[in-house]
Image (cartoon, rainbow, N blue to C red):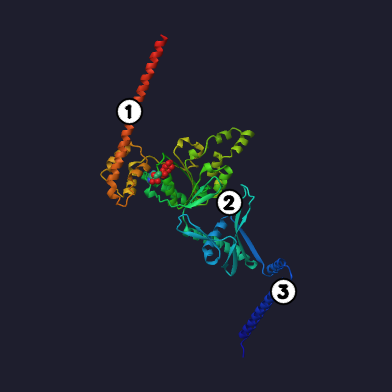
Amino acid sequence: MFSKSALVAAMEKKGSNKMFSNFGSTLASFLLMYATISKFADSSLVNRLFAMIKAFLFPQIRIVIPAESGYWKKNTLYLAVETYLRANASAKAKSLKAIADQGGDKFKLKLDENESITDKFGGAVIKWGYYCQRNPTSNHYEKSEKHYYTLNFSKCHRDLVVGSYLKHIVETSHELSSKYKQRMLYSNSTEEDEWTKVVFKHPAKFDTLAMDTNKKNEIINDLTCFRNSKNYYAKIGKTWKRGYLLYGPPGTGKSTMIAAMANFLEYDIYDLELTAVKNNVSLRRLLTNTAQKAIIVIEDIDCSLALTGDRESKKKKKSKSDMDEDKRKNTVTLSGLLNFIDGLWSACGEERIVVFTTNHVDKLDPALIRRGRMDMHIELSYCSYEAFKVLAKNYLDIDSHPLFNEIGELLKTKNITPADVAEVLICNTTESKVSRATERLEELVAVLKKDQKQEEKDATEEKDETEEQGRVKSFLYAQVRRFYQ
Ligand SMILES: Nc1ncnc2c1ncn2[C@@H]1O[C@H](COP(=O)(O)OP(=O)(O)OP(=O)(O)O)[C@@H](O)[C@H]1O
């Protein structure tokens, strides 16, 4: 005797067998029909017809993910897909592109153009493709190449793919990026309003930065507070960004400080060469394409552009010809730049630090560096005794030496940059650095004394020159007086 459940199971099995046999015979008839018709009819017509039948029987959805999400902005989903597929592509794709990283010792594999791979997620089969559309008649406002990914999947998995799969891609790409993240240095060029990047491997750290300890700690605290203040900035209604102005003579460590900041915060650097930016539109395009967790640097801002005056002349109402002139000049203006530092456009990214450096702080338009725009003004100056001790530790591996006192005294009266001190202390040798310490320090004492002697000599020469000029002047006066008498 059969039990009731065994009977039901037998019936279900019979039903599913019947279903499979139906599907099998439909497929067989479909293929037979295809083979027969394609013998007699035009093949492209047949292909189209069968594609239509296939689309009807198994409806598909196609999503295109372009590289850019608008005129200016990179599509972050495209970047996420790129990272996600890079992790999967090498195992599944037949045609790949290998791209060396900047260090040259590693490489990345990427889907080749027109190549596709399949991925599976929660029962859905997703087919990915990578393509490039070329437009030879493009102009400045339109790119000549448009890259995009496509994903195709069955219509019945629409909610799963759109709701969960895309989210899964973004999350996985974040995990992968933080796992393999290398810090990047981006720079712009005159040809395109685009960033090019290289791996950033500068070894500078705050520990090795030669400067006053209190000042250094103040900067480290400021950066730490900034990094942890997302909620605070949201609460006070301010964009999460901070400006630093680094000023001081050449060779006092402004660039080194930026590298130390980037390494401390683990941020990328965008080194903006303002002289290579065509106009405010290009500037906007570049800056809207900077990522979060970034330091945007404009070095030697005083030399970058004639930024002063623009706002002054704007205050006086501009005539039409003035405005035409501005357009013709086609340059970046001070107001264009300020718009990015704290105007409306500053809100199109967060967790960003803006750094200006200059050797001549007095030459800058006060509007550019007022507090609130440049929140912290940091002076990097000539080498102090404290800074010298950091350099001695970095370069010679020593914390003390009998010559330290003498060097300390000389530094009180000498203006020498940390770069010049470093140049004297550096030992390009395989020998122990400590064994060369005395020789290097004696050399430094000699340089400092030589500079002192040179300064004394310059002062004496200057005095002699002034006295000589005085004598010539009195002689000429005497001659003139005698002439009129
Ligand atoms: N404060 C410092 N601490 C440690 N090293 C320093 C410091 N200042 C300068 N140096 C050394 O001198 C070199 C030049 O310094 P850096 O380029 O940072 O100076 P800078 O102020 O940016 O100069 P410039 O204004 O000419 O760009 C650095 O590579 C570094 O080795």
Query: Which amino acid lies under the numbered mark 2 shown in the image of this protein?
Result: Lys
Q: Report ligand 1 position as a quadrant.
A: top left
Quarter of the picture containing the N terminus is: bottom right
Tell me, yes or no, if residue 198 can be seen here: yes
Residue 20 falls in which quadrant of the image? Answer: bottom right
Label for residue 130? none
Viewer-nearest residue: 1 or 69: 69
Q: How many marks?
A: 3
Instruction: Tell me which residue sits at (64%, 79%) in the image.
Output: 16
Query: Which amino acid lies under the numbered mark 1 shown in the image of this protein?
Result: Thr
Residue ID for mark 2: 73
Query: Which amino acid lies under the numbered mark 3 shown in the image of this protein?
Result: Thr
Classify mark 1: residues with Cα within 10 Å, few (<14), some (14-19) or many (20+). Answer: few
Q: Is mark 1 within 8 Å of ligand 1?
A: no
Viewer-nearest residue: 232 or 62: 62
Tell me, yes or no, if residue 171 can be seen here: no
Q: Is residue 443 left or right of residue 373?
A: left
Residue ID for mark 3: 36
Residue ID for mark 1: 460
Q: Residue furthest top?
A: 485
Secondary structure under tag 1 reads helix
Quarter of the picture containing the C terminus is: top left
Classify mark 3: residues with Cα within 10 Å, few (<14), some (14-19) or many (20+). Answer: few
Tell me where residue 143 appears, x and y as whole percent.
61, 51
